[in-house]
Image: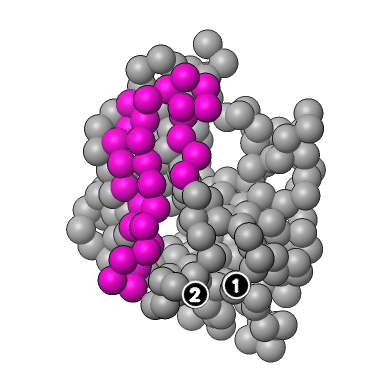
Amino acid sequence: MLYKSLIQAITISTSFLCLSMNAASSSPMKILRDFDKPSGEPAWFAQNDGVMGGVSSGWGEIKEGHLQFSGELSLENNGGFAQIYSRIEQSDLTKYTGVRLRVKGDGRDFQFRIATDARFRGSRIAYRATFPTEADEWTEISIPFSSFVPSFRGNFLNGPPLDLSSIRQIAFLLADGNPGPFSLVVDWIGLEGDENSLPLDAHPEE
């Protein structure tokens, strides 16, 4: 029942969070990941609902200069999510105001997630924001850091707020409650903010 509430909470939150998204802005931006050199890109790892008995599949692959997140969502066995994540050691993003993505989806709503050193009951808290996609269309999405909300296993938390000085992971997740195949292609991930911000370490140690 906990995981059913997880999926319901994520689905209900989608409309609210999408309202906080802005069309691509003209703010200065630095590229965090551009996927042009697969051999030099930090790895992306799959973490699907099999950790709780589900049977959804999802994986990430860097191909033809893009990150491709695809698989099949299943609600069987109280499952219903697929995720890929990557570690990051850029320790201070306090001079930045948000994330900008260039993506091509399948019309479904995906989540972009950030993990810091913050923990709840011994596990990392996920700071998440939902963004829409248009089927087979490239779009740019700007997500202010103020739109990210803390959650733990699908349940919203009252805090702590997102600490931009201790970013440890970034992730893409699908949990829209609609079973079936999915696809998200990511051209690049950027950071919006001060153009004079410190340079990024885009190749952390694994």
**Residue at 24% across / 38% down in the picture?**
181
Picture disc at residue 40: 2
Residue under numbered circle 1: 203
- Location of residue 136 by image quarter: bottom left
Q: Is residue 56 magenta?
A: yes
Question: In this view, which residue lies farthest toward the left?
Answer: 136
**Residue at 47% across / 44% down in the picture?**
46
Return the x and y of residue 197 as percentages of the image width and height: 70, 83
Return the x and y of residue 188 as percentages of the image width and height: 43, 70
Camera-nearest residue between 197 and 71: 71
**Residue at 67% across / 83% down in the picture?**
199
- Location of residue 134 by image quarter: bottom left
Camera-nearest residue between 169 and 9: 169
40 vs 157, left or right, is: left
Q: How many marks?
A: 2
Residue 23 versus residue 37 in the image, above or below:
above
Q: Is residue 158 magenta?
A: no
- Residue range highlighted in magenta: 46-74
- Residue 152 appears anywhere in the view: yes
Badge 1 crowding class, 10 Å Cα cut-off, few under 14, some 14 to 19, many 20 or more, is some
Q: Do the residues labelled 1 and 2 touch (CB within 8 Å)?
A: yes
Q: What residue type is labelled 2?
A: Gly
- Lower sequence index among marks 1 and 2: 2
204 vs 133, left or right, is: right
